Image (tube, rainbow, N blue to C red):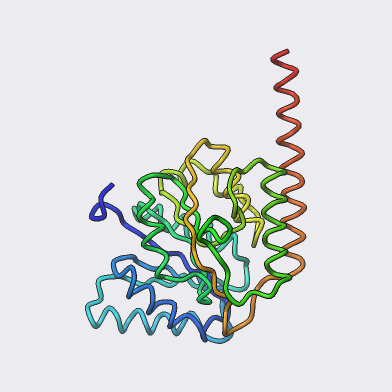
Amino acid sequence: MTTEERRVLVVVPTYNERETITLALQRLAEHVPDAHVLVVDDGSPDGTGQLVEEIAAAETAAGAPREIFVMHRAGKLGLGTAYIQGFGWALERGYTTIVEMDADGSHRAEDLPRLLARTNDADLVIGSRWVRGGRVVNWPLHREVLSRGANIYTRVALGLGVKDGTAGFRAYSADLLRTIPLDEVASHGYGFQVDMTWRTRQSGARIIEVPIVFVERTAGESKMSGGIISEAMISVAKWAVAHRTAQVKALFTRS
């Protein structure tokens, strides 16, 4: 698919990201000016959704080449459901490439063109911190240990074959998303990213990892919590048991 044929939508979930969303949108405009943006706002008390509406109106009046849309949700419904709704919205409107990206600046817009350049070669392109050339900036040691450990755990348990299955900066083909029963994906946080990677791997689709620089947020508050981490670990364990059980059953069936 040529650049002219590709229609890109960047889905950006927000909850109280007023301090960072303006710069995030500015950087996207600079590095991927033709990519449209859908901000999925979970009723941010700080007015993030309304601010994005104002930015969108100003850009439209100025004749910007992209469009910014806002999906207002009733409350804090979670990262996973925000992406699922965003994916559905994108598929209904004919976008060919759907990008996941955080609003806090940790995912750099300047890395996105390199992800998009590989979408002709794979159905899922992951912006990876843990492949050669990838790195993190300003992360405390315990965060790095947690992320590396979580990825080793998921890689061994599920046989994902990727270094950064928990990454939240990625580009999906619309064709892949149409094959995944999105209404069955109920995971959140780290668990959502692993779930989608696992479903992609099971479908036989091709996954590519592209190195990125992940920068710890400098404003706002992280949404990571012990509950999100526990959910991910428990979910991976369940998927791994089901996967290994199926493998054993298949082995005995062949025998």
Residue 201: percent from left, percent from top: 56, 41
Q: Residue at x 72, y 29 (%)?
A: 246
Q: Which of 50 and 135 is in front in this view?
A: 135
Task: Decide if residue 135 is on the left or right side of residue 67.
Answer: right
Task: Single out the residue that lies furthest toward the front.
Answer: 132
In the picture shown, does residue 150 fall above or below 33?
above
In the picture shown, does residue 19 fall above or below 255?
below
Task: Single out the residue that lies furthest toward the top.
Answer: 255
Residue 23: percent from left, percent from top: 43, 82
Count up the numbered dots: 0
In the picture shown, does residue 78 fall above or below 130?
below
Q: Residue at x 37, y 83 (%)?
A: 55
Q: In which quarter of the image is the C terminus?
A: top right
Residue 149: percent from left, percent from top: 72, 57
Q: Which residue is drawn at 77% across and 60% down?
A: 230
Task: Decide if residue 1 is on the left or right side of residue 171.
Answer: left
Residue 39: percent from left, percent from top: 46, 71
In the picture shown, does residue 233 fall above or below 102?
above
Q: Which residue is drawn at 68% across and 75% down?
A: 140
Q: Nearer the viewer, residue 113 or 34?
A: 113
Task: Decide if residue 62 is on the left or right side of residue 253.
Answer: left
Q: Quadrant of residue 10?
A: bottom left
